[in-house]
C-alpha cells in the first residue's frame, strides 16, 4: 500500500519505520529536518512542509491510498493551526480527489473533559474544559465530514502515551524535587507507543472506521502510579500541593472496550513500570 504519514513526531516516526519494514511505500512529512533525518534511508519519500501546506497536501491525497495524520502542537498556542487548520486543508484537498481514500487521525482523550472519575466510551457526551480540547473536537468534526465524499475516516482518541524514551521512571525522575499541583487523585489513562502503532495498523488491515479509544486496562490514580515508580526505582516520593492550581483535562477512566470488541489485542494491556 502507499501510505502518507503527516507529522513525524513520537508516533509518526515509529509508525513510518514499522510500515516501511512491512514493505509499504511510505511518504512522510514533518516541519523538522531533525525528525526527518533518521527516516531518509527508510521511507520512500520525505517532505519538509507544515501540515497546512495546500500544495503538499494535495499531492499526498492524490498519490496515496492511506493518509495518517499524527501531527502534534509545539505549544498550546499552536493548537488551532496545528490541528484545526490542518483538518481544513485536508478537507479542501479532498474536494478535488475523485478516488475516495482512507484517513486515520490521532486525536486525544482530553476531548471527554471533566467526567468526575466516571468511565467514558466513544458515545458519551463530550464535556471539554479547555480551549485545546474544544479545538480537537472541532478538528474531529471537520475530518469526519469528509465521509460525505465517500472517504473512510478513522479517529483514534489516544490516552497519554508512554514507551521508549518516554519511560515512566524518566518522567518521575524529572518531577523529583518539584512541587506538583493538586493531590494526584485523578485517574490516569495511558497507552504504550506500540499499542498506538498496532491500533493504526489494525484499523487499516481490518478496514475499520469511526471513533475508537486507545487506552490500556489500568487506571490507577496518578499519585499511586508515581509512588509505585518511586518504590521500584528507589526514588524519593514526589511532593503534591493541593493548594496549587493545576492544569488538567478532567477526571475520567477511558474505556477501551469498543476497539477490543472488534478483536484488537493490546500488546501492553497493563502498565509497564520501566
Image (cartoon, rainbow, N blue to C red):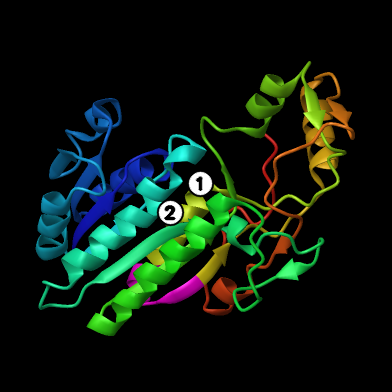
Answer yes or no: is residue 267 visible.
no
Image position, residue 142 (x, y; %): 37, 69
Q: Which residue was labeled with disc 1?
A: 193
243 left or right of 149?
Answer: right
* Residue 209 included in the magenta stretch of the image: yes
> Where residue 217 is drawn, which disc sits there?
none
Q: CA distance from mark 1 to mark 2?
A: 7 Å
Would residue 209 be found to the left or right of residue 50 on screen?
right
Q: Is 204 left or right of 73, judged from the image as shown?
A: left
Q: Quadrant of residue 42?
A: top left
Q: Residue at x 49, y 58 (%)?
A: 136
Q: Who's the residue at 49% across and 72% down the image?
A: 211
Tell me which residue sits at (41%, 49%) in the image.
Answer: 80
Mark 2 lies on residue: 197
Horizontal side, residue 28 vs residue 155: left or right: left
Image coordinates for residue 149, horizontal then vertical, percent: 23, 81
Magenta segment: 203-211
- Measured as percent of width and height from the top left, residue 62 is found at 10, 64
Picture coordinates of residue 54 (x, y %)? 16, 53
Task: Look at the image and tell me in which quarter the N terminus lies.
Answer: bottom left
Comparing 252 with 43, the one in front is 252
Tell me the SS state at disc 2.
helix
> Mark 1 touching mark 2, by CB under 8 A?
yes
Whether residue 51 is in magenta: the answer is no
Which is more toward the observer, 194 or 35? 35
- At label 2, counting other C-alpha atoms closer than 10 Å, the crowd grade (few under 14, some 14-19, many 20 or more) is some
Amino acid at each position: 500500500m502507499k501510505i502518507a504519514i503527516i507529522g513525524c513526531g513520537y508516533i509518526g516516526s515509529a509508525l513510518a519505520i514499522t510500515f516501511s519494514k512491512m514493505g509499504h511505500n511510505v511518504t512522510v512529512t514533518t516541519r523538522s529536518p531533525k525528525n526527518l533525518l533518521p527516516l531518509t534511508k527508510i521511507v520512500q519519500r520525505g517532505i519538509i512542509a507544515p501540515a497546512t501546506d495546500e500544495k503538499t497536501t494535495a499531492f499526498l491525497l492524490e498519490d496515496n491510498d492511506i493518509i495518517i495524520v499524527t501531527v502534534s502542537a509545539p505549544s498550546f498556542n499552536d493548537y488551532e493551526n496545528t490541528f484545526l487548520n490542518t483538518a481544513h486543508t485536508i478537507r479542501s484537498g479532498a474536494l478535488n480527489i475523485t478516488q475516495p481514500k482512507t484517513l486515520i487521525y490521532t486525536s486525544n482523550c482530553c476531548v471527554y473533559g471533566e467526567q468526575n472519575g466516571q468511565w467514558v466510551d466513544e458515545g458519551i457526551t463530550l464535556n471539554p474544559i479547555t480551549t485545546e480540547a474544544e479545538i480537537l473536537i472541532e478538528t474531529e468534526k471537520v475530518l469526519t465530514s469528509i465521509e460525505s465524499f465517500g472517504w473512510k475516516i478513522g479517529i483514534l482518541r489516544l490516552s497519554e502515551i508512554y514507551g521508549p524514551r518516554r519511560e515512566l521512571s524518566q518522567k518521575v525522575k524529572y518531577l523529583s524535587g518539584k512541587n506538583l499541583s493538586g493531590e494526584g487523585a485523578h485517574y490516569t489513562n495511558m497507552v504504550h507507543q506500540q499499542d498506538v502503532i498496532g491500533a493504526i495498523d489494525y484499523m487499516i488491515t481490518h478496514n475499520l472506521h469511526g471513533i475508537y479509544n486507545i487506552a490500556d486496562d489500568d487506571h490507577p490514580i496518578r499519585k499511586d502510579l508515581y509512588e509505585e515508580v518511586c518504590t521500584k526505582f528507589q526514588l524519593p516520593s514526589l511532593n503534591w500541593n493541593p493548594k496549587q492550581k493545576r492544569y488538567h483535562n478532567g477526571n475520567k477512566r477511558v474505556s477501551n472496550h469498543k476497539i477490543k470488541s472488534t478483536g484488537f489485542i493490546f500488546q501492553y494491556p497493563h502498565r509497564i513500570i520501566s
